[in-house]
Image (cartoon, rainbow, N blue to C red):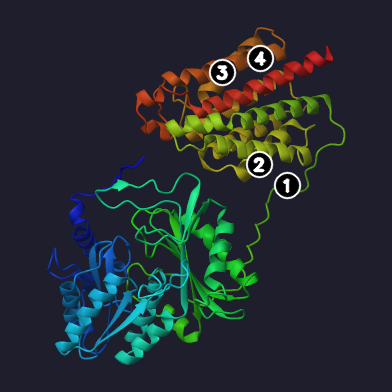
């Protein structure tokens, strides 16, 4: 069911003018013409001096594609950008005002995306400007490779490849080339680039409802940047498969959209459509480069990844591929002050990047030198069953932990803990010196440190390393139950010292502190170690459950209201209680087998 879209805006009819006002407040090198609301033109703040001896380069179109095109105004790129209303071509008078503002004796090039409204409005403005004595040329960019060649006047849509054309045209103009020469460079670039997009959702226009045209688990291939239907709707696939399909479509010899053949040099642009995280865009880039190299035989000379031409809040990305030569690369590398052109990409890139080797540890015992004993002692057997039970309990609890953490944190407690548990299980089979309790506990900490990120990872590493240091002080080969209890107490103290939490803070310590207290109490009372361990595990579970009634004083939960906190226990405390209880039950079962 469609629903009202959520937007951080004021009046839906004023979003473009308010965007421009925020843009020029942010970037000192940008300014706008005093013609709101009819004339919405962003231009270089130094337009007066820039127009004296250089060709002006202007682009634009409907808004909603930010940072295109206003974000690419600046020395070395666009002289001005003409902004229409959202998804609506700018009016002729606005385009004409932009031409008049930035065009000097050298003339002006209009770079226009291939949409009927843009062609007509920019075309009429160009004719009017010529009648006023301005020298104006126009280049139409139609880089869409999603749809079959169209009959009639529509042609291929202008997509993110336009950004590359704008950069090349702006750099050519900055060198002092004539209008005809700048236009020729831009036209040549426009014929070398192809683009195709993939959307996971359609966009929501300001003040309108969100369409539910794309159902769950679906993606649309070739969806237009105004939400217009694409070539096909398909089931969502892994990004590697999606990238492969898009590259095949762009480079298909059947359509021959771009003159790119094996052995050519290319530029790759991965463009987010508005709601796609940088992480996902970088994953797409990481898959596209080797596919272009290995499957298509192309040399990838530049990679640009980010949001360049969006579609409001559309989720998805487009891929643009441009045939490159030294001239095109020099234009792309040329300096620019356009605020949204990516920095750090210039220069030749190696065909492959080899990861830098990890520095060697200075520890006396290296990870590789450790090994599992061929024959386990009684203590080694107990350690093995306890560790295995503890980590399996965490793995089984992953979804619950994530659910609880989704309410009071960032929703990844279970996944983080599961990574650590899985690593411990795998490492124990090969590397843990189980007959040496201290070293084994230390290696558990090393496994955790290697794979667990965030606060949980460092807390458990501190916990294990503190216990290891305490146990190493024991000169006996077998660790007694009281020494284990002392090690637990020392570990809790270390976590409290460095983490700053204590009893009642709604953390894992609310499970471990009562467990430690009961363990020592029962051992001092003369209970056998197995019974004491079991009773202390019950205290751990009770302590974890009691966190429902606590106000958090540490971690992300400290920012959550008490009403929300009361709906779930602390996930960290529940995880600690779970592995502690599982280890105690495993020891009990082990003893029962031997009785």
**Which badge, 2 or 1, is on the more N-terminal residue?**
1
Task: Classify 371 as above or below 206.
Answer: above
What is the distance, in whole Å, between disc 4 and disc 2 at their CAs? 27 Å
Quarter holding the C terminus is top right
Mark 3, other Cα within 10 Å: few <14 / some 14–19 / many ≥20: many
**Which badge, 2 or 3, is on the more N-terminal residue?**
2
Whether residue 533 is visible = yes
Q: Is residue 387 left or right of residue 499?
A: right
Task: Classify 418 as above or below 339.
Answer: above
Task: Give the residue at mark 3.
Answer: 541
User: In what element is the residue under mark 4?
Assistant: helix
C-beta proximity under 8 Å, tags 3 and 1: no
User: In what element is the residue under mark 3?
Assistant: helix
Point out which mark residue 446 bears.
2
Q: Position of residue 98 (x, y in %)?
A: 19, 76
Marks 1 and 4: which is nearer the front?
A: 4
Q: Position of residue 289 (x, y in %)?
A: 57, 67
What is the distance, in whole Å, between disc 2 and disc 3 at their CAs? 26 Å
What is the distance, in whole Å, between disc 3 and disc 1 at their CAs? 34 Å
C-beta proximity under 8 Å, tags 2 and 1: yes
């Amino acid at each position: 069911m469609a629903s009202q879209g959520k937007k951080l805006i004021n009046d839906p009819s004023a979003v473009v003018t308010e965007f421009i006002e925020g843009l020029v407040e942010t970037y000192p090198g940008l300014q706008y013409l005093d013609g709101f609301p009819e004339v919405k033109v962003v231009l270089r703040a130094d337009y007066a001096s820039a127009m004296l001896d250089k060709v002006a380069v202007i682009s634009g179109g409907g808004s909603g594609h930010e940072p295109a095109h206003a974000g690419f105004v600046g020395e070395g790129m666009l002289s001005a950008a003409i902004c229409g209303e959202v998804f609506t071509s700018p009016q002729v008078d606005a385009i004409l005002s932009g031409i008049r503002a930035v065009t000097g004796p050298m003339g002006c090039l209009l770079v226009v995306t291939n949409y009927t409204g843009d062609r007509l409005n920019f075309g009429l403005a160009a004719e009017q400007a010529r009648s006023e004595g301005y020298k104006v040329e126009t280049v139409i960019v139609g880089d869409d490779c999603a749809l079959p060649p169209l009959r009639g006047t529509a042609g291929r849509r202008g997509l993110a490849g336009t950004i590359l054309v704008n950069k090349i045209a702006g750099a050519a103009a900055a060198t002092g080339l004539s209008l005809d020469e700048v236009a020729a460079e831009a036209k040549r670039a426009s014929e070398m680039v192809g683009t195709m997009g993939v959307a996971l959702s359609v966009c929501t226009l300001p003040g309108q409802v969100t369409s539910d045209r794309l159902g769950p688990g679906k993606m649309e291939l070739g969806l237009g940047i105004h939400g217009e239907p694409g070539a096909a709707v398909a089931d969502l696939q892994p990004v590697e498969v999606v990238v492969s399909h898009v590259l095949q479509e762009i480079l298909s010899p059947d359509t021959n959209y771009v003159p790119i053949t094996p052995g050519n040099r290319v530029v790759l642009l991965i463009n987010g459509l508005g709601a796609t995280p940088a992480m996902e865009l970088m994953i797409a880039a990481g898959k596209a480069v080797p596919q272009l190299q290995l499957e298509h035989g192309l040399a990838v000379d530049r990679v640009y990844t980010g949001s360049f031409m969006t579609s409001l809040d559309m989720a998805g990305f487009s891929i643009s591929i441009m045939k490159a030569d030294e001239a095109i690369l020099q234009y792309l590398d040329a300096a620019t002050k356009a605020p949204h052109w990516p920095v750090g990409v210039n220069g030749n890139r190696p065909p492959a990047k080899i990861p830098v080797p990890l520095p060697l540890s200075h520890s006396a015992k290296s990870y590789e030198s450790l090994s599992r004993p061929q024959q386990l002692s009684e203590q080694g057997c107990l350690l093995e069953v306890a560790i295995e039970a503890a980590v399996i309990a965490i793995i089984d609890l992953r979804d619950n932990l994530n659910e609880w953490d989704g309410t009071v944190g960032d929703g990844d407690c279970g996944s983080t803990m599961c990574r650590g548990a899985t690593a411990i299980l795998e490492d124990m089979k090969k590397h843990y010196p189980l007959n040496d309790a201290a070293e084994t506990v230390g290696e558990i900490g090393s496994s955790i440190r290697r794979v667990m990120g965030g606060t949980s990872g460092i807390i458990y590493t501190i916990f294990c390393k503190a216990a290891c240091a305490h146990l190493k002080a024991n000169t006996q080969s077998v660790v007694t139950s009281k020494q284990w209890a002392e090690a637990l107490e020392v570990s809790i103290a270390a976590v409290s010292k460095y983490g700053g939490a204590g009893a009642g803070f709604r953390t894992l310590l609310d499970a471990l502190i009562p467990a430690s207290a009961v363990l020592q109490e029962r051992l001092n009372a003369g209970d056998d170690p197995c019974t004491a361990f079991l009773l202390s595990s019950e205290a751990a579970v009770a302590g974890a459950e009691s966190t429902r009634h606590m106000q958090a004083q540490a971690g992300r939960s400290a920012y959550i209201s008490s009403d929300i906190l009361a709906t779930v226990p602390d996930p960290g405390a529940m995880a600690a209680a779970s592995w502690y209880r599982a280890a105690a039950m495993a020891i009990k079962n082990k003893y029962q087998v031997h009785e």
